[in-house]
Image (spheres, grey):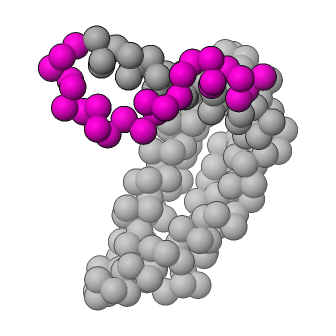
Amino acid sequence: MKNIFYFITAVSIAIALSACGGVEADAADHAKEMCECLQDAGLDNSISISKLQDRGFQRDLERKMEKTVPKCLLPIVKEMEEEISDLSKNDKKEYTKAFLKACIDTECTDIGLDLIPYDLLGLGLGEAESVINDQRRYRNEYDEYDEYDEYDEYDEYERDDLEDLFR
């Protein structure tokens, strides 16, 4: 499951970095085309968290994504690069903003956002704070790290206080 998310995130970042300019309408068209590539590779509303936890489903989806998505995205990214090559830096910046906004408005983003277990975010926050406090305690065990204590925002939290917050 992590590999699929990492792959999609990496592709999105690469596309965003490659897409540094152009006309806003073109940006929206390219975002839509890229979403269609992901949908052709199997990204759809039938994907659920339970399906993503199935290793067989993960492998099949990942293989299909790895096989079809790069071939589909490469011509789009090349076209985007051609469109932006003669633009000023400011125009490239505006295109990138338009492209990222258009990506957010695609159906693919809706599918991804539907997979976020929003009801479990509190548990994730509690776990993150626990890790931070564990790191602080580990760091405080060694004198050589004392110079970093002034940056420690979590000194006022004690484990009991954090546990009370998340009960």
Residue 78 picture location, percent across and down: 39, 66
Q: Is residue 113 above or below residue 151?
A: below
Residue 151 in the magenta stretch? The answer is yes
- Magenta residues (range): 142-167
Question: Which residue is found at the position 29% from the left and 38% from the top?
Answer: 150
Question: Which residue is found at the position 22% from the left and 13% from the top?
Answer: 142
Residue 163 in the magenta stretch? The answer is yes
Instruction: Give 165 or 87, whichever is nearer the viewer.
Output: 165
Q: Is residue 165 left or right of residue 153?
A: right
List the single residue furthest toward the front. Answer: 156
Question: Which residue is found at the position 50% from the left and 36% from the top?
Answer: 6
Instruction: Give 2 or 68, whichever is nearer the viewer.
Output: 2
Quarter of the N terminus within the rendering: top right
Q: Is residue 40 left or right of residue 75?
A: right
Residue 65 picture location, percent across and down: 58, 38
Q: Quadrant of residue 34?
A: bottom right
Quarter of the C terminus within the rendering: top right
Q: Is residue 10 above or below residue 129?
A: below
Q: Is residue 86 above or below residue 16?
A: below
Instruction: Give 84 or 94, whichever is nearer the viewer.
Output: 94
Question: Which residue is found at the position 60% from the left and 64% from the top?
Answer: 103
Q: Is residue 83 visible?
A: no
Q: Is residue 165 visible?
A: yes
List the single residue furthest toward the right. Answer: 46
Residue 144 picture location, percent across and down: 15, 20
Query: Is the stretch drawn in magenta largely helix, strand or loop?
Result: helix
Instruction: Give 41 or 148, whichever is nearer the viewer.
Output: 148
Q: Is residue 23 above or below residue 114?
A: below
Residue 85 picture location, percent across and down: 29, 80
Q: Is residue 26 left or right of residue 155?
A: right
